[in-house]
Image (tube, rainbow, N blue to C red):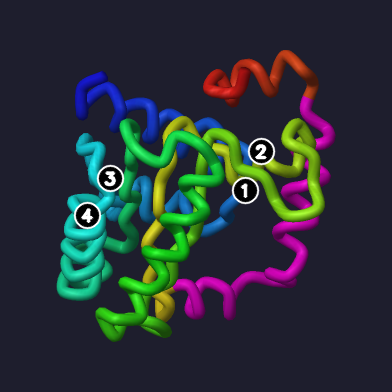
Amino acid sequence: MSHTQITQHINQWLDDVVIGLNLCPFAAKPQRLKQIHITVFNGSDEAELDKALLSALDELQTLPAQERETTLLVTPNLLKTFEEYMLYLQQAQWLLQRAGLEGIIQIASFHPDYQFDGTEPNDNENLTNSSPYPMLHLIREDSLEQVLSKYPDPESIPENNIKLMDSLSDEEIKRLFPHKK
């Protein structure tokens, strides 16, 4: 798939799932203002992905939030299994720490086959972090703290999202998560 097609898939997922279902109540404004940057890494080598991640981290912390609020680093050709993804996520956290950005940027995780600890692969709650492609979501900590301070009861977001996923019909799940088999 082309970079444009992948970006379109990610934007559709953001609009229909993340924003449309209000899984992240803070995503609509940056999406509307075009402050969500999508970087598609088309390589298949983890060492090259390390470089792309470090570059994305550097760009995010260098640019003002008004220009780039957050970055999605998408890896359509790499980290295909959830196990590979989780191993790389540890590497990504280590790179974040080595770059001196812990506490400045955090990494949220999304994968087509996302599975929380203690769940079965097909449990609906896993859909809250299911995305069309493996991706690392790079989030500015200070921006996150600002929006959380203004949001009533932010601790309820995960529980509310799980309830929402459980309320979806099979048809809605197929439409919203076409990447799920």
Q: Quadrant of the N terminus?
A: top left
Return the residue at label 1.
Answer: 23
Q: CA distance from mark 1 to mark 2?
A: 10 Å
Residue 46 located within the stretch drawn in magenta: no
Query: Pointers 1 and 2 in contact (CB under 8 A)?
Result: no
Give how far across and how far down residue 170 sits, in percent: 77, 17
Query: Between tags 2 and 4, which lies in front?
Result: 4
Tell whether 9 sits left or right of 7. Answer: right
User: Residue at horizontal 34%, vertical 60%?
Assistant: 70
Query: Is 52 situated above or below 150?
Result: above
At mark 2, the secondary structure is helix
Instruction: Tell which circle, 1 or 2, labels the residue nearer the N-terminal end.
Output: 1
Q: Is residue 145 magenta?
A: yes
Residue extent of the magenta highlight: 144-168
Which amino acid lies under the numbered mark 1 shown in the image of this protein?
Leu
Percent position of residue 138, x then y: 37, 62
Secondary element type, mark 4: helix
Query: How busy is the neighbourhood of tag 2: few (under 14 within 10 Å), some, or many (20 plus)?
Result: many
Q: Residues within 10 Å of mark 4 (few under 14, many from 20)?
A: few
- Viewed as shown, does residue 28 lie left or right of 59? right
Q: Earlier in the sequence, mark 2 or mark 4?
A: 4
Q: Looking at numbered disc 2 in the image, what kind of residue is underneath it?
A: Leu
Q: Residue furthest top?
A: 171
Q: Tell me if residue 82 can be seen.
A: yes
Disc number at residue 12?
A: none
Query: With respect to residue 69, does 45 lie above or below?
Result: above
Give the amino acid type for the residue marked by disc 4 in the picture: Ala
The residue beneath circle 2 is: 127
Residue carrying label 3:
38
Looking at the rendered structure, the secondary structure element under dot 1 is: loop
* Numbered tag placed on residue 47 in the rendering: 4
